[in-house]
Image: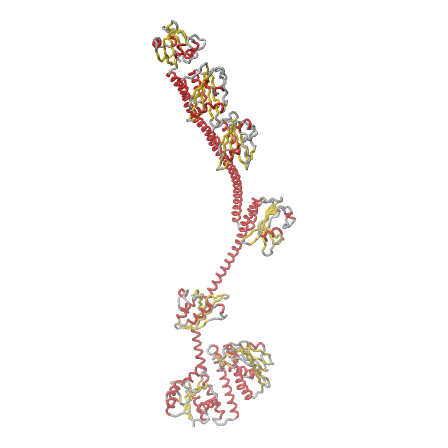
Amino acid sequence: MEKELISALDFRVLDHLSEGVLMVEADGGIQYVNQATRGLCALEDGSPAPTRLHQLLPDAAVVQQLLKPPAQIDVQLRNGRFLQCRSQPFQLGSQRLIQLILNESQTQAFETLVAANQTLAGMLEEGDIIALIGRQMVKATRSQGFTAYRWQPEENRLIVLSDQPADERAAATAVGHILPPETIEPITGLLINQESTAFYQSDHHPTPALNIAWLNQDLPFAEAYFPLVVSDETVGLLQIVRQGPAPQFSQPDMRLLEALASRASTALETAFIFQDTYEREQFYNALGNVSMAINFTLEHETLLNLICDESLRIFEVDGAYIWQIVADQFVGSAGRGHGEEGFVGTTVAAEDMAAFVTTIARNGQTTFINNLAEHQATSLRIPQNDAVQAALGVPLEQEGQIIGVLVLIDTHNPNRFNHKHLTRASTFGVQVAIALQNAKLFAELRRFNEELDLRVAERTRALHEESNRVKILLRITSELSASLDQDHVLNQALHLVNEVVNATQGVILLVDQETSQFVFRAALGMERPIPPRGVSTGMMQHEGLAGWIIENRSAVIVDDTSNDPRWIDRPESSDHRAVLGVPLISNDEVIGVMMLFHSEPGAFTLQQLDLVEVAAIQVANAINNANLYLLIRDQAERLGRLLHAEQIETAKSQAILESIADGVLVADSYNRIILGNRPASVILDIPRQRLIGKSVNELLGLYGHSGDSWINTIEKWAQNSEGMQDLAFLADELTIEDKVVSVHLSPVMAGKQFFGTVSIFRDITKEVEVDKLKSEFVSTVSHELRTPMTSIKGYADLMLMGAAGPMTPPQQRYLKVIKNNADRLHMLVNDLLNISRIETGKTTLDLRPLDLPQVLDQVVEGHLRGRIQHEQKNLQVSTHIEPSLPLVNADHARVTQILTNLIDNAFNYTPENGQIKLYVTKNGDYVYVSVQDSGIGISRENQAKIFDRFFRAEDEHVQAVPGTGLGLAIVRSLIEMHGGELRVESKLGEGSTFTFNLPVMLEDKEPA
Amino acid sequence: MVKILIAEDDQDIRELVVLTLQFNGFDVKSVENGALAVEAAQQDVFDLILMDVRMPRMTGYEACRRLKEIDTTKDVPVIFLSAKGQEAEIQTGLSAGAQQYILKPFAPDELIGTIKKVLGH
């Protein structure tokens, strides 16, 4: 190259050099500058060139050095540029010139780099970086222009990123212009190998440079290629083109260009990283904002639209659409941007495999399609989808299920999307899904809240109602409890209940137990008031609606009485259309009904019924209470009266007890003395206080009486009170010191129950004494009387016998009189003795089994027949004895005495030729004996008297018979002592029948 | 002849009985009280003793008992004569050893009849 320079005289050639060449005189005057110099010095076209060297180079020293060739020094031009300058002597003909050659020295190159670096340092825009580098490259090599491409390795094609001809007026190749694989084939290798290369047209390859718009096809060109490597991967290509007669790129050029390209790569990398980071940051900021915005938006529809809006913004796309899966369809839910009108509501079937959404949904992966026009198989299914160049779809996933798809589209750039969008879109998709979930949850929550509010409101209302009801019930209860006046209570109840029910009329009917009719007891809204004890309705308790209520024990609402068969129409109830009736139940018994009426049909509700039912319980209770109160009051009065009466009785009894002379002790069923009067304590000689509480047994034992048998008997009474005989009692005599006390103890029964015993104590010492005296008297008298009688009778008998010699008849007669009277006397004495002994109980019976007929026979045959014969009184005697008579329990001697007496009477009082009939029969537990005569009979008034002592009838026949009048008295006493009775039947003048009975012997024994 | 001893404190009755017995062919000795009766019965052999119950110094019962203790007299039948007719008295008499008990006043034939019965005629 230098050689050419030196030998060439055509300065015009010099103009093609990239180095600056100057021809200067020894004094520094400039003779010639070439084009390159002008460029280096930043001289504009048309402006005069500098004439002196020092105009270019400010440093005089440098100038001096240069003017003494050869020299090579770094110079700084006045415009500040650093250059390397070489000076050489140049012989131009005769002129001794100096040739200065200006180079962008290493330094310069370095400075360019530095400058580039500096500028680059602040650059982050890819476009800017490339543009700058491109310009630098073009400037540094004075090329015609540069082009930057993006390389798509999969398609092996280059896409124009930037095209900058040095001449700004020239047309630039379109951005985005694609160089297909065939075109770039020559340089594919360097792209892959990351080598920079320069081509020369002399190589005759079709090269990409051919596609450059501003390329001057007539001029030869050289092209240099520099791959842009970012992160170890070729992402693009820089192309520098020089045109000229013999264009080429020198080594230094190439080195510089490579450095620049490398710098550009680094800068790009940084820029990309920065961009990436920035973008990411921006994205995430935006995403953050969007998320916040999204999350603040809980309205589903608003949310969807917001998502679309934000998608447009942060992804900088032309359209965003959201499909949601409903059933087995995709439904367009929101859309923004291109084709948004008419999107909402469109559907895509799940089986539509051609649809983009379907693919996304099925794969569950964020996917993009660039160059959509070339993918005929896939359709976006959005309005105006023909304009869409690229699309990115994001599946929206909730809990493992795809709920929808977000699709972003670009209508301008077919290569809009790349892998970094995938991550970001996925992330966004997650946020969207979450937001949608939240929105859904929110919607649910809101729905729940609304429902809850509704429920709460309802419940509050219900509680309020309930509270009201309870309050009313409380009032009813307290008012009802306040009074026991039944009428008042009932009317009050009706009024209180009606506060809830608002009936036009109401009644309370109670059932009258006796008549089984309903009785009005209280009324509401009626004209006539109810009288105090109520007034009958005239209806029976099974009639009508009220009757139904009673029978079924159930409350009832009748909406319209005209339709209800149970209702009985009555004139006064003609405007009762709606009825609410409840039974009044107390103690499980229906005592009445409460009915409320309204003139409008259907006026009553079930809630009112509930309340009234509850109130009815209170009313029934109140009625019950009022009744109970009356009952109790009556009872109390009665009890009071009883008590009073009892007290009086007790006082009386007490007085009586105290006033009787006998001692009375009352003992309870445990034989404890609970009551005793004063005489008892005196007789028993125990102070009263000590008597009370003492056991009767003790008392009996105390006085030497063997109370064991008594104790047993009392116990038997206590245990077997049912079987006790009516007249059971125990009687005995005790000797207490010098007193003789008779004790009579009998049980106290109330109905069948054994209550205790009553003991009567009588001081019978006197009686006993008297008895003793009487006995002794009787004994003495009898003895004393009998002794003289013996003599009287005896001597009379002697004389009659002739012991004193023969008697004259008169003497005999007189003696007989004496003897008869002595006999009479004797009989009287005997009778007297008998009666007195019987009366004092001295006579004891020797009871044995007795054959009554036999005894009778003895008396009849012995005594009676004897008298008949002896006294020569003709009487017919007959006996009628029943066969198989049982033995009787009797005293032989006494029975003989009885029979003798009765038979004697029959004999005495029956005139000659009369009859005496004797009957012996059995009847029940007794044997009856009848002595019948046909004698003088006994008058009715005398029939009672004959049993009296000393009674003798006035009748002359009776008086004729000697007798004391004691016979029947004695006989009756004896019979009664046996446990029998003596009766008489008689008619005056016709005869008498005396009948007595004796008890049958209960055990078979040998007859006495 | 049958020999009968009669003990009776009432003179009239004593004489009555003596006369009655004599009239009926009996040999009679009479004493006034029980003690004398016991003496007499030992001194003499009697076929029958009639004893009043109520006598001074010794009652008929006592005398009878005594007589029953004495060998020579114990087999002599005793008949009580008394105004006391109660069952208890009769029993006492019989348990004292008497054969019979006759109540006063008695008819003479009643007395004779009883005596004859006791003596076995």
Between A700 and A91, which is closer to the camera in this rendering?
A91
Between A610 and A827, which is closer to the camera in this rendering?
A610
Q: Position of residue A1001 (x, y in %)?
A: 50, 78
Q: Is residue A287 visible?
A: yes
Q: Residue furthest top?
A: A94
Q: Position of residue A300 (x, y in %)?
A: 52, 33
Between A592 and B75, which is closer to the camera in this rendering?
A592
Between A433 and A14, which is closer to the camera in this rendering?
A14
Q: Position of residue A874 (x, y in %)?
A: 58, 87
| B73 shown above or below A762 | below
| A438 shown above or below A619 | above
Q: How many marks?
A: 0
Q: Is residue A893 visible?
A: no
Q: Quadrant of the N terminus of chain A?
A: top left
Q: Quadrant of residue A349?
A: top right
| A551 shown above or below A797 | above
> In the image, A277: left or right of A621?
left
Q: Position of residue A411 (x, y in %)?
A: 53, 26
